Amino acid sequence: DYDLIIIGGGSGGLACSKEAAALGKKVMVLDYVVPTPLGTSWGLGGTCVNVGCIPKKLMHQAALLGQALQDSRKYGWQYEEQVKHNWEVMVEAIQNYIGSLNWGYRVSLREKSVTYLNSYGEFIEPHKIKATNRKGQVTYHTAETFVLATGERPRYMGIPGDKEYCITSDDLFSLPYCPGKTLVVGASYVALECAGFLAGLGLDVTVMVRSILLRGFDQEMAEKIGAHMETHGVKFIRKFVPVQASMPGRLKVTAKSTEGPEVFEEEYNTVLIAIGRDACTRNIGLDTIGVKINEKNGKVPVNDEEQTNVPYVYAIGDILDGKLELTPVAIQAGKLLARRLYGGSSTKCDYINVPTTVFTPLEYGSCGMAEERAIEEYGKQNLEVYHSLFWPLEWTVPGRDNNTCYAKIICNKHDNNRVVGFHVLGPNAGEVTQGFAAAIKCGLTKELLDETIGIHPTCAE
Amino acid sequence: GTNEYDLLVVGGGSGGLACAKEAAQFGKKVAVLDYVEPSPQGTKWGLGGTCVNVGCIPKKLMHQAALLGSALKDAQHYGWNITQPVNHTWSVMAQAVQNYVKSLNWGHRVQLQDKKVKYFNMKGSFSDTHTIRGLTKAGKETVVTAENIVIATGGRPKYPEHIAGALEYGITSDDLFWLKESPGKTYDKIKNDVSLECAGFLTGIGLDTTVMMRSIPLRGFDQQMASLVTEHMESYGTKFLKRCSPTKVEKLENNRLQVTWKNTDLGTEETDSFDTVMWAVGRAPDTETLNLKAVGVKTNSETGKIIVDASEATSIPHIYAVGDITEGRPELTPTAIAAGKLLARRLFGQSSELMDYENVPTTVFTPLEYGCVGLSEEAAVQCYGSDNIEVYHAYYKPLEFTVAERDATQCYIKMVCLREGEQRVLGLHFIGPNAGEVIQGFALGIKCGATYPQLMKTIGIHPTCAEEVTKLHITKRSGLDATVTGC
């Protein structure tokens, strides 16, 4: 029936579908959100729009504004001392905005003549899927080519009480009541970003970490992020894992040390599990048509053209094995895939030196390699790391955090002092990092960096 | 006989101090003279020059105060309960800013001491090509000789002296940042970015501010961007009197100031009263008191600035100049610093590296900030012809504006590229929050010879404003709607 059927209406899926339609193809997108154990669901747009980047950044902004309120007094602004945050007002405003995005996507698909089904898609035979909507009604559709873009969902701990009493990021952004005293389990960027903004809104927040913070990220930077959060009131319980969540009255968490017999018990209003995300590949009939997945993590291995082992099935976005879980990567991959399939292009997605930013209270932007990774790749003696502690001008008047912001660049001495890693910890880290990522794409070296004049006064300079 | 010092720097601002400290690193005997002639209103300040005392630093801090005012409004949309009324007290801000500036003055003195650079708080003038006569406030004279002399005395705000009452009753940026009391209802006569920035933050902290312009704002900058900047300021609350020229300033009985002006469009004369009148009609170097004529250092007859070659040398051997005082150079702190450092390295460090003034990025810190690097669209058209350039652009909305219900009409990005070949980027222009932070990295990219395809290959960071630069794809030539839609 179709040239292209895309399973998953998130960042990657939608970008691919719109590009293919623009190239004149008959396209269908299926998107379906299986409700969370607590019953949370959402509209078209995928993780980023509904339960990821967008609400995360907006809540982060709410927390930053709380800090701005404190700073403002030092800059001469006066108002009543007692300032409180109203969770419901914030959630309503954010959900309204997300609703407008969901709507916008539906309109956009309609305008581009992409068929949209709010149904759960699964393969039943080669080139054919079964689509089941919320009411249980079933339809069947065939296509020449398929793209898997089903993304991921938060992983639970597999301990008693986790699904009954705990929430995940899937629930947090539309939680109809203030989470109150919260335990965040995990040390992923999701965990730290959420813990960060919850604390910024004035809540009592504890983070329980099994081992290290931000696995996979530069560990020097990760520790600095954690240290800053601790200085600003977030409690950390390190080397413990929860073993039970129960509700004898209030929500109680029991945790065990990873190093000994120590047991920890505490009551919380909310427990947010953020230990990782699992690919949505187990129940969509991939085994029926022979698409291989990585059994360990459920992710889909693809070649450098995003093709799976089954030639007419491609995959993009968070479900890809060994690729970055980022919206812009998924969008880029989706667009370029459509152009290669239907537009005669041969341009592949460039996964090298993709910049990213962690929106913790002290933001962390990076592009290229972590220092550990660079040492592994090039050898310590072949690298030069330039670094600097800086104090944003805007923080001087309120007298905040004067030895906290930090930047480092890692240069390869054997390649003209080429910049192989860029890391910055400070305000507006994303805005700062973006241009540096472009420069790194252009082959930035230390010399070129030195020759560039700074913009004064900024952090980026 | 031998000269006392290897290097004498006249002017302890961004350029002068950077040069002096760099020279000292090479083990040279260095001295710095710095002196602040009080403004007509009597304002003066310590070591560090314009940037530290009456420029970049206090300006950005007051801009931040204004931004925080907007943040207070935004915060309510994000759930923060702030009981009205919200007021701003000038003296709290001014004192905090002035205290910080003073800590920088102190820091500079300590740094000079640490680097064994001799500091004279004296006004310098030339006696001969190797001799400077320094005069203290009390009139005590000291003669200093040096093998090399660097002039880095910068500039001071100009007064429109032909306007009656301008000098007597008006202030300039020299005074604004040191006012102990609020300027109140302010009239800003402007010519350039300095005063748009001041008008911007004055409006932001709640003051009734009017800007009077004879012709175009931000002369020398991309004019499309300049109008977006002023358009935003207008919607933000700053009043603009365009194509008007003041004729006189008088003091009223209640101590307010009455300004009379000519409206060139309507041919009428109008008046209004203000608490403060601020002139920002340009800056000029104070070369008269330097006594340059005595040594023959050539200056530009129109601007009064010192003429230098690519190595910062003046017309007289062993006499150099850096910073705002030099003709044809950008009036920016970072360029002065870089030029000063490189000069010291060439004089004493066996370097031959010259300062590169191409593609210097800059940012105007108006309420909605404007950052840019490279050529304006007009300059690119002039240089290459409109058929040979491609202009990519986009109107975008910062995510943070959505919940805050803020108007993003003027949030705009424009990239000017060569149309043929590798499509090298000639200029990048960005209006939006944190414009300086956004542009800096792209300035690096341009230094690396960035091309349009390379920028498009760069993956964006989501969600940010800066990522919109990597997504630019609508050209002006196409005539298509350049509004960014969704993820």
Image: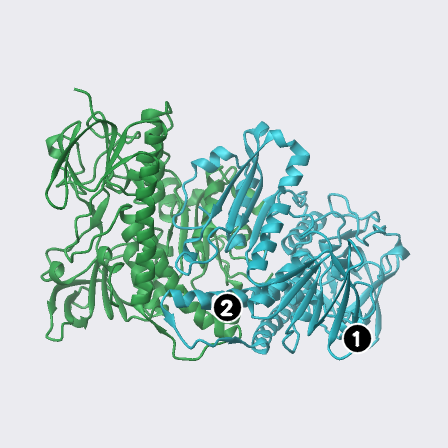
Farthest-out residue, front = A261
Give the amino acid type for the residue marked by disc 2 in the picture: Gly
Q: Quadrant of residue B369?
A: bottom left
B233 left or right, relative to B452: left
| Helix, strand or loop at mark 1 | loop
Proximity of marks 1 and 2: CB atoms separated by less than 8 Å: no
Quarter containing the N terminus of chain A: bottom right
Q: Which residue is nearer to you in this view: B359 or A198? A: A198
- Report the residue marked by disc 2: A66
Q: Looking at the colours in the rendered structure, which chain would you say is drawn in cyan?
A: A
* Residue visible at 14% across and 35% down in the picture: B142
Q: Residues within 10 Å of mark 1 (few under 14, many from 20)?
A: few
Q: Is residue A421 visible?
A: yes
Residue A438 lies left or right of residue A211; in this view the side is left
Circle 2 packing at 10 Å, graded few (<14), some (14-19), many (20+), is: many
The Cα atoms of the two marked residues, 1 and 2, are separated by: 40 Å
Q: Is residue B272 above or below residue B324?
A: below
Q: Colour of chain B?
A: green
- The numbered dot on residue A276 is none
Amino acid at circle 1: Arg
Query: Vertically, is B129 above or below A73?
Result: above
Whether marks 1 and 2 lie on the same chain: yes
- For the point 16% across and 72% down, the residue is B256
Q: How does the figure colour the protein chain or chains?
A: by chain
State left or right for residue B165 relative to residue B236.
left
Q: Residue at x 60, y 70 (%)?
A: A203
- Residue B453 visible in the snapshot: no
The residue that label 1 is drawn on is A134
Q: Circle 2 marks a residue in which chain?
A: A
Rendering coords of residue A15 (x, y %): 66, 58
- Output the chain of dot 1: A
